Each structure stands twice: as structure tokens, then as C-alpha cells.
Amino acid sequence: MIFGKMTLEKFVEEVKAAWGDNLVSLVLYGSAAAGDFVEKKSDYNTMAVLRDDSSGALRKAVPVVRGWVKSGHPAPVVFTPAKLADSCDVFPLEFQDIRDKGRILFGQDILGALVIERCDARRQLEHELSGKIQSLRRALLSGADPVKLRLGSLSAFLVLFRHVLRLLGEPAPAAKSAALEPLCRRLSLNRSAFEGDDFDVYLAALDKVAAAVNAMT
């Protein structure tokens, strides 16, 4: 039985013991791997690559993962090596970040083998940008506070801005906050559009980013 708050190191050891030879790789990704981790606010995102991902195999780690979730962290996402390779066209943006910023906690380095096609990344990026911008407009139409909308949405857009930079052939900074300056420079946008309180200017700038991605080939 697991008592108290589980550390990442303890989680790794417990998962290794629970899955044994079935565990091919355990990967840390997200803010903790990219340099955006905020103590007591951020969580640890992990991906487990298993030889066998059947329900019976998964259940062997239930006690460990239950303790991990109770400590405030999400359960790992799970793939087999084949399913991981097959999913690169479904989750290209997520897998780009995992490949570029992820950290192997145990096992094989399966990240370098991930093949992300530019067309898949561009398509998902356009979808994500357009969907989030549409959500802002719907929220505004529903009477939400524009200032709170900007403050609440910027972090998610900064994550996408890193992917815009990749498509533009620019280095994608590890910290999402560092993506704003190079993005504005490349797209001739004013940084204050994203940091000021004028929601109309903010929304117009987001539209320009989405239009730039839509125009990419």
C-alpha cells in the first residue's frame, strides 16, 4: 500500500515493479519536462509504452496509479510501440512536444523514432487555433469578461505559438512564454496586443496568427 504524497522518483520505481518486462519506456512530458513547471500548481504528465496494453496488463499498475492520481497527477497515457507510431498523424502537435522536450524516465528512448509529418502538424494547428478563437468569441457573446478571457486563454495560445514557430522554420523555445517575442517578430505583430487589456486588439492578433497558419503549405 502507498502512503503519503508520491514523488516522481517513487512513481517510477513502483511502475517498474508493477509492469516489469512489459514496460518498454516511461516518459515525462509537458511543463515539467519543458521548463514551465510551477511548484504546487503544475502536475507531472507521463506516457507509458507497453508491449501489452490489454486490460489485464493495465490492471497490474492500478494500485500505483491510484496513489499517483491521489497525489495530484494524471494517470499516464499508454501506447504500445506500434500504436505510438500509428498515432503520430492523430496527435502530431502533442508528439512533437514529447519528442522535442520529453525526458526518458525509464527504458528505451522511443522519442527519436517518432515521425511527424508537416502537413499533419499544420492541419491540427489550424484546427486548434480556430477552435480556441471560436471559443473566445462564443464566451464573449455569452457575456464573459474580456479581460478575464484574455488572461485565461493566453497560456493555451502560447503553447500553440511554439508550433507556429516550428512551421515557420524557427526554433521552438522550451518555455512557452518565450514563444511570444519571436512569433511577433516573424508575423509583424505587436507584442502588446497579447499583453494589454484591449480584447479587440488581442482577438484581431489571434486571427492574424490563424490566417498565417492557414496560408502555410
Image: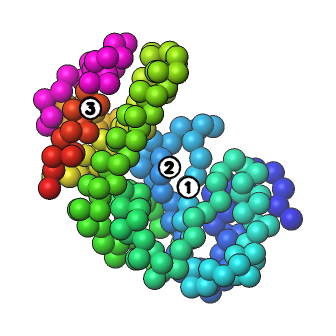
Q: CA distance from mark 3 to mark 1?
A: 30 Å
Residue 207 is tagged as 3
Mark 1: few/some/many CA within 10 Å (<14, 14-19, 20+): some
The secondary element bearing badge 3 is classed as: helix
- Residue at 81% across / 51% down in the picture? 4
- Residue at 73% across / 72% down in the picture? 61
> Is residue 117 in sight in this rendering?
yes
Residue 95: percent from left, percent from top? 39, 62
39, 45: nearer the viewer:
45
Residue 70: percent from left, percent from top? 76, 51
Mark 3: few/some/many CA within 10 Å (<14, 14-19, 20+): some
Which span is picked out in magenta?
Answer: 185-204
- Residue at 13% across / 29% down in the picture? 188
Q: CA distance from mark 1 to mark 2?
A: 8 Å
Q: CA distance from mark 2 to mark 3?
A: 30 Å
Q: Amino acid at mark 2?
A: Ala
Q: Amino acid at mark 1?
A: Asn
Q: Amino acid at mark 3?
A: Asp
139, 114: nearer the viewer:
139
> Where's the C terminus, which quadrant?
bottom left
Residue linked to disc 1 = 45
Q: Is residue 88 above or below residue 3?
A: below
Residue 126: percent from left, percent from top? 30, 48
> Where's the N terminus, which quadrant?
bottom right
